[in-house]
Image: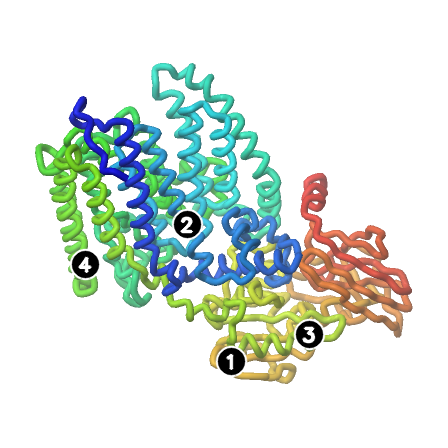
Amino acid sequence: MAAPQINNAHTHDLSAADTIALYRWAAVLFLSGVLIYAWPWVSGAVTLPWDAKAQAWPQLAFLNRSLHNGEWPLWTSNVYAGWPQIADPQSLIFSPPFLLLAWLDPTLEFRDMDCVVFAMLAAAGLCLIFYFYDRRWHPAGALLAALAFTCGGSAAWRIQHVGEVLSLCWFAITLFLVQRSLKKQSIVYGIGAGLAAAFMVLGRDQIAFLCVAILLFEVLDYWFNAPERWERFRRSLIPLGAGFITGASVIIIPLALTLALAQQSNRPEISLMAAERGSLPPWSFLTFFISNIFGTDGPMDLFWGPQNESVWGPTTNVLARNMNELYMGALPLITLITVGVVRGQIIRRDIIGLMVIAALMLLYALGGYTPFFAVLYRIPGVDLFRRPADATFPFCALLAILAGYSLHRAVTERMSPLRGRALWGVIIVFIIWLLGFLIAAKFDRLDQAARPLALAFVFLFGSFYVFALLVRFMPHAPLACLVAIAIVVSVDLRLNNRPNESTALPPAVYDVLRFDSQNETLAFLKDRLRIQGPDRRDRVELAAIDFQWPNVSLVHNFDNDVGYNPLRLMLYEDVTHVPDQVATPEQRVFSPLYPSYQSRMANLLGLRYIVTGVPIEVIDRQIDMSSFALLKHTRDAYIYENSKAFPRAFFVAGVVNANFSQMISTGQWPDVDLTRSVILQDSAPMPSPLATRSYVRIISYANTDISIEMSADHDGWLVLTDIFHPWWVAEVDDQPVRIHQANVMFRAVPVSKGAHIVRFRFAPLRGMLRQMLQ
């Protein structure tokens, strides 16, 4: 590409050809900067940690394994005694890039997932560059905005929250496509915008919820922020209508399933008080200026941010430490302050809409720290989410656009940051940097904050000088200026948002999550689980081992009675009190109906192997070890066997009636032998005969289809100890039968004496419709 030349007809304008050339260079420089930034991850030297591996990776592994085994990934028995994957926002089934990866690559590695995340961020950054091009803003601003968006802000420091990052990426893609469809009045781009928006909404997280609001605001701003508003409105109806119809047709079924699941789950809505605990502390805004000032990148005991009660005093805030970090680069920040704020450029007619919605996102993120969140909380849908601080994702994205626009205004209007009232920007930045220094000194953390403060000083005040040079030389050497922007911002973000304990860990930390893991504990369990009777599919519990262990079963295809997911079926949580995570001993709690591993409920679950990171007596103080054998003590865990665990499927002839709600609250079981009778609350009691003979064999057990061969010399019930769920249907010898809720939370179907084939099938659409009509 030849270096573009300045069109002398206007000192600050580029010719059309030179503008296109510069935008091409901006795209190349942007991709180069992203590659440099992301190289530690895409090279495999480090991997996205924490939730990316403990939660997102097992979901991807399950999806991958299911597809390559020829199974539907719509339900899994691998966690919580059964879980509807199709309705879970975090299952990745409706995430096109991950679905494509799972389908195409039969031998997934950690790096594959990480590369998809960064590829999506790069695609989103390119769409921001196109967005700037369509609005005829300077390519320098486009490059700055794209780098800040992709390698900075919450997306950089919370990149392990893979689903939220992808929702943000789809937002940037949708924003460009909406802008393009409005500009060109194009049905094709409208359909593209509808698809991208649908993929964003299918993330079904708070980021998607907030970004839908931003996109609606952007369309309203396009309609009303111009004299010809009626004409704009009329001409945009067809492309926007095409997009709406396309998007709605894609999301309607998954969204309906998720809403139906919400009503069955432990968390259909969040209280205002609970949501306010996830508010962003105002002191976190120091990290816009000084990255990592609170020690977010190091060991947990060195973190001294606003959530640390030993430093800041009592707090109800429950945010993870990396949620404080907002750094998106010194040059974007300097540009935004000196030109956008001090010179008032972000309140110009062509950008004020984004500025207003950014301010609203800021108020939302602060949550309970301002009175405005209580008002915002009344908006339908807000009460579905527990963390207002998640609004920093779209807030930082909007700031990146505002910073890019500010640079556009600066270089086209020759606004130097070192002249006139722009010097107030220098004063503001120095005051905030000094405030950070004084706070670190006040809490005796200067030694820890010395490096972040020094780096911030160099980049913040060096950026003023770089900015001044950009304004001066952009008309004469635009390509050189673009290269300078790419180098300065890339180096800044590479150093200040570098891989750290919150964003990158060695892949070896997560070895147990590899398909080919040779972990000793895992290998022992797999060997034991291979030796099972025809009626058995024994469950395992993985408790208090480490953060990445609870969802291991999704990767290695065995059934675990716990897992890691903030959502659980209400029935399962009520019965067991199992929390969303059991990485530490104190997180494993019991319930009245499930008071110990040595209990009827544990036996009914078929809980054969209990794997704990500490001796089992530390977790369960009621346990009598007479029924449990310590099979092995590995480097990771203690492995115990419960010899009284029930088979997965069995026949009983008797029926006992009981009130399940009362049983759950009191923990009292009726006087019944569960090997001979089933507990129901909707059938007539029937005494069990003195003796029966039966045979039960599991013919096949797939994700969504279970076939069982059985015979009995008496009428009775086939009990399957998977969680009862209204989206399952059953057939006995190809004839539909009703599935009854049995033994509080399991399934049972009536069978007559003789030989039968009983089939359970997962039918979510039919089940959801039946649930809606009831």
Marks 4 and 3, how far apart at CA: 56 Å
Q: In x, y percent, where is residue 740? A: 76, 55
Nearest the viewer among 171 and 294 is: 171
Q: What is the three-letter code of the residue carrying label 1?
A: Pro
Q: Earlier in the sequence, mark 4 or mark 1?
A: 4
Residue at image mark 1:
615
Point 47% across, 25% down: residue: 186
Q: Give the crowd class for mark 2: few <14, some 14-19, many >=20 residues within 10 Å.
A: some
- Per the model, the C-alpha gap separating discs 3 and 1 is 20 Å
Q: Where is mark 3, residue-wise?
A: 645
Real-space CA distance between mark 4 and mark 2, rounded to the nearest whole angstrom: 37 Å
Residue 121 on image: x %, y %: 39, 47
Please report whichever mark, 3 or 1, sits nearer to the chain's N-terminal start. Answer: 1
Image marks 4 and 3: residues in contact by CB distance under 8 Å: no
What is the C-alpha distance between the residues marked 4 and 1?
42 Å
Q: Give the amino acid type for the residue marked by disc 3 in the picture.
A: Ala
What crowding class fits label 3: few (fewer than 14 Cα within 10 Å), some (14-19), or many (20 or more)? many
* Secondary structure category for the residue under label 4: helix
> Distance from label 3 to label 2 (Cα)?
47 Å
Q: Gap in Å between the C-alphas at discs 1 and 2?
A: 44 Å
Q: Tell whether label 1 touches label 3 (CB within 8 Å).
A: no
Is 542 left or right of 367, judged from the image as shown? Answer: right
Residue highlighted by disc 4:
440
Q: Residues within 10 Å of mark 1 (few under 14, many from 20)?
A: some
The reply to whether dot 1 and dot 2 touch (C-beta < 8 Å) is no
Asked if the residue under mark 1 is in contact with the one under mark 4, i.e. CB atoms within 8 Å, the reply is no
